[in-house]
Image: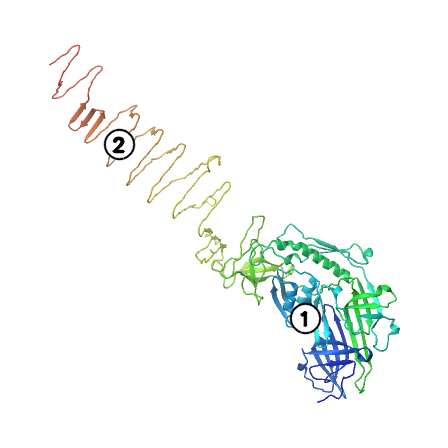
């Protein structure tokens, strides 16, 4: 059905997917600004009372505003329909309203939580803006951010926040084919306004031309204010703990002389966290930390320039529809020279309308805008108005790392985690930045350390609530990682139990366990392999004394045991061992040998009372003295040496043997015989008699010598001499 009313030759026109002239544009009011979404409210007419909104919502439409003599120049405004409203039906038309927004508005409908790692700001922006028509034109050098998180934010809020933080603004460029988003950081190099001229003339309000023939501005006001004179930022990174990373910058302004001495100090500056001296795999890259000292100057300079850029603003009204935010315009002809010059347009509010569609020809048309701009010579940076992302409490996450690893850490004991909300993470070493692990005690090469292992669930907090600054503050059990002791049966048990790595099992662990059950209290220590204890001074261990308990101690060593008391010569002032046993001591060697070696010194065994018994059931006993004496003294009592079977031998390689009974007798008894022998001489006693044999045998009695027997024979084979003072032969 063809339309009765058409927009051809009218200075305010609308093009929609519904077809030509199905919707007639009666009035438009809207605002477009730098680093903000433009919005235009349209008052529409249609001869059709039942338009289908689904054919408009989200679809691109365009608005044309003619300017100049006979509409020689056309300002285009493109956008998409965000809202469409049907109003009352009149005699000829049904009224509608529509809201027009940029494609960028669609990012306000998408909310996400995701992580960007080691990406520059333009890379982050490109990823968020994927699918939209945009162009990034940056002149500054931007270092990649080690870790940046979009947390429960719309894509628009997140993008606005990170762009504002970097001093990057955005605006839209319109053409007959639609609109394009542009990102920039160089307002002094911004493009000039489209249209027949980038210069507008300032005229008094009463000289406003009735027709839109020439671009003019009027009702100009210039606002100047007092601002802070200096910015100072501090920041902190644990990798450079002794430095505050300070950076300061004065605010440079033509009004410098009247500015008070007012400093803006802020912490954290949020430039240090951009860098990490450890790469994603755990390797060193200390050079990155030095970049902080360039970044802090860049950021503080940005803050100072952003403050100065808004110290002076120019506001006005115009008939020129080509005034566009993000572009430059030159104002001339104002009676006050300070008002003239080149300005960067920050925002423009448009109003345009046609009075009626009842006439078949051209209808009266009005257009006016109001605008805000700043001097070009003050580099513009957008105000930081986007809300900061904040995590309002602790979260839990799972420790992750490379496939096949059980522990993945850097030299600081940091680990990687996978947050439960992270849809893009792959449960690997790229799931997060390195996250510090809090410990109850930390000092310079002393303190406590427990490195969370892959698969463990940890509690993560965030410094100042910033999702870019996670820190692990604890660990928790879950249904897959249960406590080491069965609960609630063993609720009185607490302790520390580890797991051997790699490829450990429930049977391979170290453990210190406390049992606090009344009457069964216990401290249990288990070493999976070696247990080493070092005491720098004294160690005292008492068993059973505190409560006068039975106080038993059992030491079982499966293989060998070595006990060393004292250090080497000159290292210890003493090296003695004293063992006091109240009652009995039993030493049992089931098999093998016992060796006691004294390299130097004496050995003394004293029995104050009682007996000593040494029993060898089988085997030999040997006592060897390489040099020195062997002395056995019995002050009172008897000495008995008894061999039930076998031989007794006393052999002196050199020296004398002496047996002396100071009081008493010496008795030697043998069942078969006793023989004493020196060289060829001998005395032999056996059951048959006594035989004395030698080269010369001399028997001398000082008083009397008696030789007597039933039969006595004296025989000299060569000579026999019997001599005496009186010799009697009976």
Is any part of residue 192 visible from this angle? yes
Which tag, 1 or 2, sits closer to the chain's start?
1
The residue wearing badge 2 is 649
- Image quarter where the N terminus lies is bottom right
User: In this rendering, is residue 230 above or below 701?
Assistant: below
Position of 658 with respect to 89 (left or right) is left
Q: Nearer the viewer, residue 495 or 421?
A: 421
Residue 518 position, x and y percent, is: 48, 53
Residue 680 position, x and y percent, is: 21, 24
User: In this rendering, is residue 102 above or below 24?
Assistant: above
User: In this rendering, is residue 665 above or below 730?
Assistant: below
Residue 224 position, x and y percent, is: 82, 62
Local crowd size for mark 2, using a 10 Å CA cut-off: few (<14), some (14–19), many (≥20): few
Contact check, label 1 and label 2, Cβ < 8 Å:
no
Local crowd size for mark 1, using a 10 Å CA cut-off: few (<14), some (14–19), many (≥20): many
Q: Which residue lies most toward the bottom here? A: 1
Q: Is mark 1 on a helix, strand or loop?
A: strand
Question: Any mark on residue 134, and which?
Answer: 1
Q: What element carries label 2?
A: loop
């Amino acid at each position: 059905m063809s339309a009765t009313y058409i927009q051809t030759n009218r200075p305010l026109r609308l093009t929609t997917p519904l077809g030509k002239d199905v919707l007639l544009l009666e009035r438009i009011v809207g605002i477009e600004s730098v680093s903000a979404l433009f919005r235009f409210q349209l008052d529409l007419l249609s001869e059709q009372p039942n338009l289908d909104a689904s054919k408009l919502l989200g679809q691109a439409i365009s608005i044309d505003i003619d300017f100049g003599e006979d509409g020689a120049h056309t300002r285009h405004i493109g956008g998409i329909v965000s809202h469409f409203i049907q109003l009352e039906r009149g005699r000829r038309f049904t009224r509608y309203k529509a809201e027009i927004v940029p494609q960028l508005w669609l990012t306000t409908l998408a909310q996400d939580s995701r992580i960007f790692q080691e990406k520059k700001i333009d890379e982050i922006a490109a990823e968020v803006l994927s699918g939209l028509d945009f162009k990034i034109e940056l002149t500054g050098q931007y270092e990649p951010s080690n870790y940046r998180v979009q947390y429960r934010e719309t894509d628009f809020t997140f993008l606005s926040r990170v762009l504002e933080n970097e001093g990057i603004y955005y605006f839209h460029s319109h053409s007959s084919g639609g609109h394009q988003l542009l990102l920039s950081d160089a307002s002094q190099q911004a493009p000039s306004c489209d249209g027949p001229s980038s210069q507008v003339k300032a005229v008094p309000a009463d000289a406003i031309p009735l027709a839109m023939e020439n671009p003019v501005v009027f009702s100009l006001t210039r606002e100047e204010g007092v601002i802070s004179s200096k910015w100072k930022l501090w920041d902190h990174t644990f990798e450079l703990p002794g430095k505050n990373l300070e950076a300061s910058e004065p605010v440079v302004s033509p009004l410098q002389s009247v500015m008070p001495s007012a400093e803006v100090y802020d912490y954290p500056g949020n430039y240090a966290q951009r860098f990490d001296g450890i790469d994603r795999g755990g390797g060193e890259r200390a050079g990155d930390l030095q970049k902080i000292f360039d970044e802090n100057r860049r950021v503080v300079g940005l803050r100072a320039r952003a403050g100065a850029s808004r110290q002076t603003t120019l506001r006005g009204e115009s008939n020129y529809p080509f005034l566009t935010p993000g572009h430059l315009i030159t104002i001339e002809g104002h009676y006050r020279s300070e008002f003239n010059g080149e300005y960067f347009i920050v925002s423009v509010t448009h109003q345009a309308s046609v009075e009626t569609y009842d006439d078949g020809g051209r209808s009266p048309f009005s257009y006016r805008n109001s605008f805000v701009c700043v001097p070009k010579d003050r580099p513009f940076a957008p105000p930081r108005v986007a809300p900061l992302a904040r995590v309002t409490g602790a979260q839990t996450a799972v420790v992750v790392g490379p496939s096949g690893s059980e522990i993945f850490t850097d030299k600081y004991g940091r680990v990687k985690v996978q947050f439960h909300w992270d849809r893009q993470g792959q449960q690997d070493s790229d799931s997060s930045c390195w996250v510090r692990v809090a410990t109850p005690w930390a000092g310079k090469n002393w303190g406590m350390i427990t490195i969370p292992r892959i698969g463990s669930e940890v509690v993560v907090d965030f410094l100042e609530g910033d999702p870019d600054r996670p820190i692990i503050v604890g660990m928790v059990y879950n249904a897959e990682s249960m406590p080491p002791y069965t609960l609630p049966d063993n609720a009185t048990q607490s302790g520390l139990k580890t797991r051997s790595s790699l490829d450990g099992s429930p049977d391979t662990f170290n453990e210190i366990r406390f049992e606090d059950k009344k009457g069964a209290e216990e401290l249990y220590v288990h070493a999976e392999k070696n247990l080493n204890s070092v005491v720098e001074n004294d160690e005292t261990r008492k068993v059973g004394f505190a409560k006068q308990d039975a106080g038993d101690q059992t030491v079982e060593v499966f293989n060998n045991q070595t006990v060393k008391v004292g250090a080497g010569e000159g290292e210890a002032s003493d090296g003695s061992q004293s063992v006091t046993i109240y009652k009995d001591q039993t030493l049992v060697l089931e098999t093998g040998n016992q060796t006691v070696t004294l390299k130097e010194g004496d050995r003394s065994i004293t029995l104050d009372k009682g007996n000593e018994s040494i029993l060898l059931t089988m085997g030999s006993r040997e006592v060897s003295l390489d040099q020195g004496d062997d002395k056995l003294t019995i002050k009172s009592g008897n000495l008995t040496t008894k061999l039930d079977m076998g031989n007794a031998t006393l052999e002196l390689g050199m020296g004398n043997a002496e047996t002396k009974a100071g009081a008493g007798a010496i008795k030697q008894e043998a069942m078969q015989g006793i023989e004493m022998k020196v060289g060829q001489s001998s005395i032999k006693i056996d059951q048959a008699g006594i035989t004395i044999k030698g080269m010369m045998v001399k028997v001398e009695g000082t008083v009397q010598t008696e030789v007597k027997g039933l039969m006595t024979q004296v025989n000299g084979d060569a000579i026999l001499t019997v001599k005496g003072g009186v010799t009697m032969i009976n």
